[in-house]
Image (cartoon, helix red, strand yellow):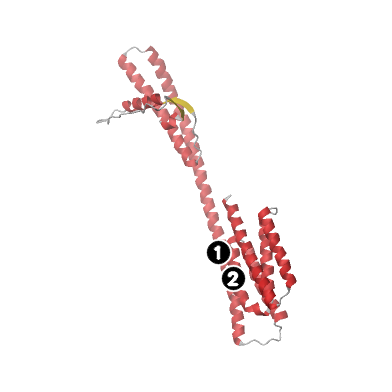
């Protein structure tokens, strides 16, 4: 979704630039007496571009090429006039920079080709082969040709480099996701393997408690049973942390008693034999309902 929005923003910028170019061309055509029919056709083209942009009736890639062709036609119309010949290079460099955002180096190649084609047309049909050029004119033309070629070359290399870096990043992300999946599967399997013997110990302890009358042994059996339940819960916590990392955490909604939850916490803390154990004091607001709705295990 993010990439689609990014491409749409790029197309919006291209359309805005094309609109401005055609507006400027219309002004120059009126002031300098250029052909008005080409301006009308370009205006219709930009109107169609805005229509397909808002309606999205044409696939994104087709729309982008439609805008590109419209840009090249505007550039060619601008460049085939004698007053614009020496302004072509900076205009095309700006166009190359604009289309570099699309990361399609075929478009950059066509930009350079359009510039050379327009210059060739100017020398053959506008200026004429018989036109005499000064040394300054020749050096300026050669410099412009070199600048446009270098701009296209550097832009293409930049696009290829960004594509390679993005591919490396995507590969690393895929490897990390694969590692996370493997870790999740491993923890799930380990959890299953650990829960089985813990359930067995808890079950046997429950049976022994029913038949045991000795107070000391019953106390020990209760400690074993409670420790097993505590370990069972900690295994569940490990899975919860894994789900949090992978963004797959699920919170259940069940009714529970807050007094029972706190009692379980106190009972679990009492089982931990520590020296200088801190005193825990629970002060529950009388306004809290006795029965709540939520995930008791995760709250605990």
| In this rendering, position of residue 25 left or right of residue 297 | right
Image-quadrant location for residue 40:
bottom right
Residue drawn at 48 percent across, 30 percent down: 192
Q: Which residue is mark 2?
A: 93
| In this rendering, position of residue 286 left or right of residue 4 | left
Q: Position of residue 277 (x, y in %)?
A: 27, 30
Secondary structure of the residue carrying tag 2 is: helix
**Label annotation for residue 158:** 1
Q: Position of residue 181 (x, y in %)?
A: 51, 41
**Label annotation for residue 208:** none
Say if 191 sits above or below 123 in the image: above
The quarter of the picture where the C terminus appears is top left
Q: Is residue 45 visible?
A: yes
Q: Residue furthest left?
A: 276
Q: Position of residue 94 (x, y in %)?
A: 59, 69
Image-quadrant location for residue 66:
bottom right
| In this rendering, position of residue 57 left or right of residue 199 | right
Say if 62 sits above or below 220 in the image: below
Residue drawn at 57 percent across, 70 percent down: 151
Q: Residue furthest right?
A: 37
Q: Is residue 62 visible?
A: no
Image-quadrant location for residue 38:
bottom right
Sequence-earlier tag: 2 or 1: 2
Task: Identify which residue, 59 or 13, lies in the foreground.
Answer: 13
| In this rendering, position of residue 40 left or right of residue 152 | right
> Which mark lies nearer to you, 2 or 1?
2
Secondary structure of the residue carrying tag 1 is: helix
Q: How many marks?
A: 2
Q: Position of residue 177 (x, y in %)?
A: 51, 45
Task: Identify which residue, 8 or 19, lies in the foreground.
Answer: 19
Say if 254 sits above or below 36 in the image: above
Badge 2 crowding class, 10 Å Cα cut-off, few under 14, some 14 to 19, many 20 or more, is many
């Amino acid at each position: 979704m993010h990439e689609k929005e990014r491409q749409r923003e790029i197309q919006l910028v291209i359309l805005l630039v094309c609109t401005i170019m055609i507006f400027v061309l219309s002004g120059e055509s009126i002031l300098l007496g250029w052909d008005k029919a080409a301006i009308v056709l370009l205006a219709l083209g930009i109107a169609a571009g805005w229509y397909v942009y808002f309606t999205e009736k044409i696939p994104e890639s087709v729309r982008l090429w439609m805008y590109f062709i419209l840009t090249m036609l505007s550039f060619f119309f601008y460049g085939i006039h004698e007053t614009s010949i020496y302004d072509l290079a900076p205009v095309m460099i700006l166009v190359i920079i604009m289309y570099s955002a699309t990361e399609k180096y075929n478009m950059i190649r066509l930009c350079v080709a359009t510039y050379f084609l327009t210059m060739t047309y100017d020398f053959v049909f506008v200026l004429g082969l018989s036109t005499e050029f000064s040394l300054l004119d020749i050096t300026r033309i050669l410099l412009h040709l070199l600048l446009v070629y270098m701009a296209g070359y550097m832009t293409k290399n930049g696009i290829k480099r960004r594509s390679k870096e993005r591919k490396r990043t995507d590969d690393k992300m895929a490897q990390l996701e694969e590692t996370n999946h493997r870790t999740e599967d491993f923890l799930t399997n380990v959890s299953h393997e650990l829960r089985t013997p813990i359930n067995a110990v808890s079950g046997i302890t429950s049976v022994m408690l029913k038949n045991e009358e000795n107070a000391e042994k019953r106390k020990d059996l209760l400690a074993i049973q409670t420790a097993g339940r505590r370990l069972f819960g900690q295994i569940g916590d490990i899975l919860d942390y894994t789900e949090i990392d992978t963004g797959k955490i699920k919170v259940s909604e069940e009714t529970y008693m807050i007094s029972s939850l706190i009692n379980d916490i106190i009972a679990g803390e009492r089982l931990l034999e520590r020296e200088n154990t801190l005193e825990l004091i629970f002060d529950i607001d009388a306004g809290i309902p006795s029965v709540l709705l939520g995930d008791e295990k995760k709250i605990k």
